[in-house]
Each structure stands twice: as C-alpha cells, then as structure tokens.
Image: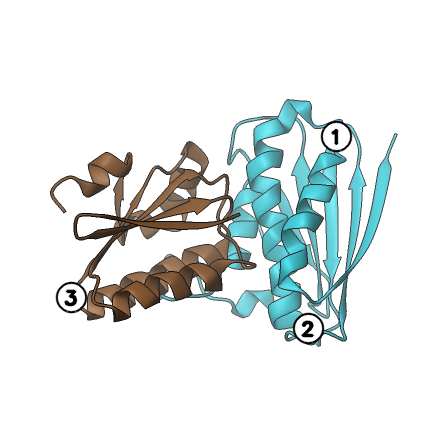
C-alpha cells in the first residue's frame, strides 16, 4: 500500500535537516534498504531541497518548496518543486573534471545522480524527481542515468 | 549539532557534532576563519560523529582548504565513515585532501 506525504517548506535552509529526517522516519517499509535510505536518500533529498531554496527560489523567503513523497514496498519517490524559473541540468558541468575539481560549488546534481536510482526533471527545470529502489542495501548500488 | 574547537599543540582541532550540510556550513567556515585570522595554520576537522555531508558541506571544506593553503597552512580531515569515504572518492575530493583514519593519525607528524 502506498504512503503519500506532502510537505510545503519555507525557503529556509535551517528547515532542510528536519524535513529530511521527517520523511526518512516515515519509511517503515525500508528496512531492506536501511543504509541506502540513511545515506543515499538523505543526501539526495538534502541536495534537492537546498538547490530548490538556493538556486530555484533564490533565497527568497516569500517563496515555497513543495515536497511530494510516495513510499511503497518497491521504492521511495520524492518530487521537489520550487517557484523559480527553472534551469537546464544538461548545462551543469561534471565537478570531477580537473577544471572543476577545486570549485566550491556544483556538486549537488552530480551527487543526486550518483546516489539515487533515478533522477529526472520536468521540462521547465524547476521540479526534480528522485527515486530510491528498496531492493538492495549496498551503498551506492544505485547511480542514476540522467 | 555544532562544532567543538580545541587546540592540540599548534594544531586547531574542529570536531563536527552531527551533519555538515547547507544549514550549518557557514558556522564551520566562520569558526575556522576566525582561527586562521588569529594566526593558526594547522587544522584538523574530525568527523567521528558525522553521518553525512552534502555538497554544500563539501564545498565549504574545499573553500577552507584553499584559504588555509593561501596562508601557507594545511587542512587535514579525519574519521570519515565508510559512506563519507565513498562520497569523497565519488567526487574525487579524496585527491585534494589529506584524510586520516582518526584524530591521532591526523595529528601525527603535523
């Protein structure tokens, strides 16, 4: 049976950790993937929320971030939507290349793709959907092809 | 969640209590830069009590490492759990930092 959660967050970086903890604590079907939920999903969802607040909503405290989560026995899906104009994820460079290795920023999307099983964006680029499958418990068994 | 700062000889040891993420990265940056401005040049940041670090946390470590090197200092990291070691390997940041198994190893010969 699917469990649905909907959260509407302010653009407040201090709210991210509590929101991620809240979602993870409600995944009672996730024992089989406990370590991937604890690490991969936590980091991936943290990245999605911080990207939405920092870049999507541009720190604007009047804008909100919508988080829609669906949990079932097979997977956890989280869609994070901001109120920004969107961006083209194809334009984000690989942060592991020599030219970008010492960059301070630019690793968020890379980590989402590496840690989650699927990462997809809407056409506008202001909504990202993360999928973590619950059929394995090896950290980094995922690795989205995005 | 917070950061405990102590001295071990001429090394400034910062112990991260909890996660290092977008919500608290500036606090870490501020604490380390205060010590850098006071003349400290050797730093160890220890992650014995850290479950995860996000890209903002990684970014602040890169930024601090640059600023410390500019002052002819060095930043070492210690006590990464297996997940965090994998994170550094994935991002290739393990090639930018000297990473010790524990605090004692990080302090050894510093």
- Where disc 2 sits, the SS reads loop
Tell me the residue at 25%/68% (across/down): B38
CB within 8 Å, label 3 to label 1: no
Q: Tell me if A44 is positioned left or right of A23 in this view.
A: left
Q: Residue at x 67, y 43 (%)?
A: A21
Residue A74 lies, with reference to residue A112, above or below; the image says: above
Judged from the image, the secondary structure of the residue bearing numbered disc 1 is: loop
- Occupied quadrant, residue B68: bottom left
Q: x, y (%) of residue A83?
A: 75, 72
Query: Which of the two discs, 1 and 2, labels the residue nearer the N terminus?
Result: 2
A21 and A87: which is toward the camera:
A21
Q: Quadrant of residue A67?
A: bottom right
Q: Residue furthest right?
A: A1
Most foreground residue, B5 or A66: B5
Say few, some or many: other residues with alpha carbon within 10 Å of mark 1 (under 14 / 14 to 19 / 20 or more). Answer: few
- Say the numbered circle drawn on residue A74: 1
Q: Nearer the viewer, residue B29 or A141?
A: B29
Relative to A124, is B98 above or below?
A: above
Q: CA distance from mark 2 to mark 3?
A: 38 Å
Could you tell me how far apart the alpha carbons at marks 3 and 1 are, in whole angstroms?
52 Å
Q: Is residue A47 visible?
A: yes
What is the chain letter for disc 3? B
CB atoms of marks 1 and 2 within 8 Å: no
Is A133 situated above or below B32? Answer: above
> Please, what secondary structure does the residue beneath circle 3 have?
loop
Provide the letter of the chain coloured cyan.
A
Q: Is B47 positioned to the left or the right of A143 in the image?
A: left
Colour convention of the picture: by chain
**In this figure, which residue is indicated by the disc labeled 3?**
B72
Q: Residue at x 63, y 27 (%)?
A: A33
Q: Chain coloured brown: which letter?
A: B
């Amino acid at each position: 049976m699917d469990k649905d959660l909907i959260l509407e967050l302010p653009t407040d970086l201090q709210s991210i950790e509590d929101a991620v903890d809240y979602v993870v604590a409600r995944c009672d079907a996730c024992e089989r993937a406990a370590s991937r939920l604890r690490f991969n999903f936590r980091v991936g969802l943290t990245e999605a929320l911080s990207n939405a607040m920092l870049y999507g909503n541009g720190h604007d405290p009047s804008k909100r971030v919508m988080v829609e989560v669906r949990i079932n026995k097979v997977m956890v899906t989280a869609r994070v939507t901001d109120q920004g104009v969107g961006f083209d994820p194809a334009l984000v460079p690989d942060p592991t290349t020599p030219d970008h290795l010492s960059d301070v920023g630019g690793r968020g999307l890379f980590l989402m793709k590496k840690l989650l099983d699927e990462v997809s964006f809407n056409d506008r680029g202001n909504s990202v959907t993360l999928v973590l499958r619950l059929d394995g418990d090896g950290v980094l068994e995922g690795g989205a092809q995005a | 969640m917070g950061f405990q700062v102590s001295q071990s000889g001429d090394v400034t040891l910062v112990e991260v209590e909890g996660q290092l993420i977008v919500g608290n990265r500036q606090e870490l940056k501020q604490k380390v830069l205060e010590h850098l401005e006071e003349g400290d040049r050797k730093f160890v940041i220890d992650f014995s009590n850290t479950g995860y670090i996000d890209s903002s946390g990684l970014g602040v470590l890169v930024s601090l490492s640059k600023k410390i090197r500019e002052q002819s200092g060095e930043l070492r990291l210690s006590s990464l759990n297996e997940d965090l070691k994998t994170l550094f390997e994935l991002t290739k940041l393990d090639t930018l930092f000297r990473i010790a198994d524990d605090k004692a190893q990080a302090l050894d010969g510093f």
